Image: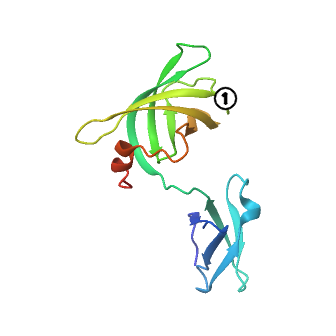
Amino acid sequence: MSNNSIKKLYVDDAGMVTFLCPKCGDSRKQSVVKYRDHIGSARMSCICGYDSEVKLEFRKFFRTDTELEGLYYRTTPEGHWGKMIVRNLSMVGCRFEMIRKDPLAEGEEINLQFTLDNPRSSIIRKKAVVSEVEGRYVGCKFCDPPGYIDSELGFYLRIS
């Protein structure tokens, strides 16, 4: 059985995934803690000898694919801004595409403003820290206080 797509496996709180072999159907739990800081795909091997390429997902909050227009504002230099499209969104962060490439850096603090595509066209404003930059794509984590739940965003994501 040939499968060219990379399967995504979600890691539980204990750092374990359940791997189901696409060849023989064997299922087993395996620790993947050693891959926490690994970027890209990983290889899982079955006792039948079949190797499978997988993407490990360590997030606690699942992301929803979106296409929301908005703006990002750099805090340094102050007043510098750009247009963006939020490509996916969770309660703790988002990934957006800059309309034009900007030299954002990991660890940089930015302000975000985007409009949800809900009936109220809710405007979300967040302070965030850039966690990764890949060309025009930027991943960031929101700077909300511990335990804070954004009810507007939560309702949008169906988590509230």
Q: Is residue 138 above or below residue 148?
A: above
What count of labels does the image hold? 1
Q: Of all residues shown, which one is farthest toward the right?
A: 34
Secondary structure of the residue carrying tag 1 is loop
Image location of residue 109, percent across then percent down: 60, 28
The quadrant in which residue 114 appears is top left
Instruction: List the residue tagged with mark 1.
Output: 105
Image location of residue 45, percent across then percent down: 72, 76
- The colour scheme of the drawn protein is rainbow
Image location of residue 67, percent across then percent down: 39, 40
- On the rendered structure, is 49 left or right of 10? right
- Please tell me which residue is depicted at 54% across the width and 15% down the height of the picture: 80
| Quadrant (top left/top right/bottom left/bottom right) for the N terminus | bottom right
Q: Of all residues shown, which one is farthest toward the left?
A: 119
Q: Is residue 14 above or below residue 82?
A: below
Q: Nearer the viewer, residue 81 or 146?
A: 146
**Amino acid residing under circle 1:** Ala
Q: Is residue 48 above or below residue 37?
A: below
Image location of residue 150, percent across then percent down: 41, 43
- Please tell me which residue is depicted at 34% across the width and 43% down the height of the picture: 152
Callout 1 environment at 10 Å: few (<14), some (14 to 19), or many (20+)?
Answer: few
- Please tell me which residue is depicted at 30% across the width and 35% down the height of the picture: 122
